[in-house]
Image (cartoon, helix red, strand yellow):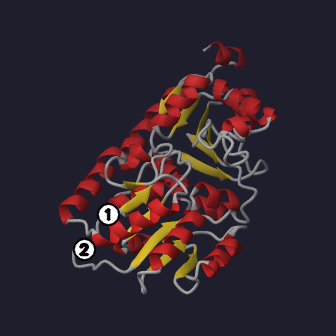
Amino acid sequence: MKICFFSHMTDHSNWREAFEKVEFYRVDIEILRSLGHEVVLAGDFKTFDRTADLYYCWWWTYAMFPVVQSLIGRKPVVVTGAFDYDTCHGVIPGLSYLDRPTWQRALMAAALRTASANLFISQCEYEKVTSNLVVRNAVNCPLAINTEHYRLANPALAREDFFFTVSWSSKTNVQRKCLESIIKAFGEYAKTNAKTRLVMAGKKGDYYENLVELAKSCGVAERVEFPGMISDEEKIRKYQACIAYVQPTLFEGFGLAIGEALACGAQVITSPSGAVPEVAVDFAQYVEPNNVEALTTAMRKAVDEILTMDRKIAQFEHINRTFSIEARREHLGEIIDRVASRKVTHAQRYQQ
């Protein structure tokens, strides 16, 4: 079967590279290909392949385009992604469903009602959206973490003196992942710890310079590193060697980096927001988002606590058991087989 894998990414200068480097895209593409399908990538409307047998769309924001194409061509369409219904309502403008313009809410709601299947990446999102909106063929299908790559280090690897986080430094992401609070907390922590570093990796966005200036104003400019995009190998090594992976957050539809860090045996400092408790369960230190004092305290606690190998193994086994590639492959295989086996008319979709 030929599948058109679509995500609207016109804000990326090279969307093909994004499909290769963004983990959740890459994993789904590899899974679909491993199921024997031909996968054609489309990062904008111009490259959308209408001749495909099935359309697979990431994000409901632009899902009405493939949904309309599916109705015209009588093709099945599967939509997946994170869906913040109300978590960031009134906090980050335009992020949650309730804060979006009326026309956009209408299009997203229509996609939910009309798509052949709607795959939610966490139980909390599945419950929140299906409780408040009409959703056709809703499925809880958690993201997968590749534990062939994200795994424990050799026990001989020594812990190094740095905290680690990964995030694209766009303004919205900086707000959502509390990056300014991380720098402020590290500034407080650094007053009594002269050598520890903070490594903030990830694509440099429109708020990057603001973070650099904040590090200067907090007196830690020489100790906060912004390496930009790093390779998977380097990211894994940093997960394995850091004091703690630090990601307080206002909202996570899943919490992929948190799961990766746990699988690599890292201590994790995060927030009980969105789907994070589903991923981290009791393996994380939880702090309220943007509580700088609590975050500073959590950093100090992480320095004093070195995880045992038994604890690291338990973290890895939890991620491997709960969020395996095989589990998502099985989910996707069953869903695609089911929706591909029946072609329905426009009227029939609204009746189901």
- The residue carrying pointer 2 sits among few (fewer than 14), some (14 to 19) or many (20 or more) residues within 10 Å by Cα, namely few
Q: Position of residue 309 (x, y in %)?
A: 20, 65
Quadrant for residue 131, please give it: top right
Q: Nearer the viewer, residue 300 or 351?
A: 300
Residue at (40%, 43%) from the top-left corner? 278
Q: Residue at x 38, y 68 (%)?
A: 244
Could one spot residue 135 in this view of the protein? no
Label 1: few (<14), some or many (≥20) within 10 Å? many
The answer to whether residue 315 of the structure is visible from this angle is: yes
Quarter of the C terminus within the rendering: top right
233 over 70 or under it: above or below? below
Secondary structure state at the residue bearing disc 2: loop
Taking depth in this image into account, of 234 and 70 the one nearest to the observer is 234
Image position of 15 (left or right of 155): right
x then y, percent, for residue 256: 47, 54
127 w.r.t. 164: above or below: above
Q: Say left or right for 151 vs 223.
A: left
The residue type indicated by label 2 comes to Asn
Q: Which mark is residue 151?
A: 1
- Residue 154: which numbered mark, if any? 2
> Percent position (x, y) of residue 227?
56, 79
Tag count in the figure?
2
Instruction: Tell me if residue 45 comes above or below residue 351 in the rendering.
Output: below
The residue furthest left is: 310
Quarter that holds the N terminus: top right
Going by the numbered disc 1, the residue's amino acid type is: Arg
In the drawing, does residue 225 fall left or right of residue 143? right
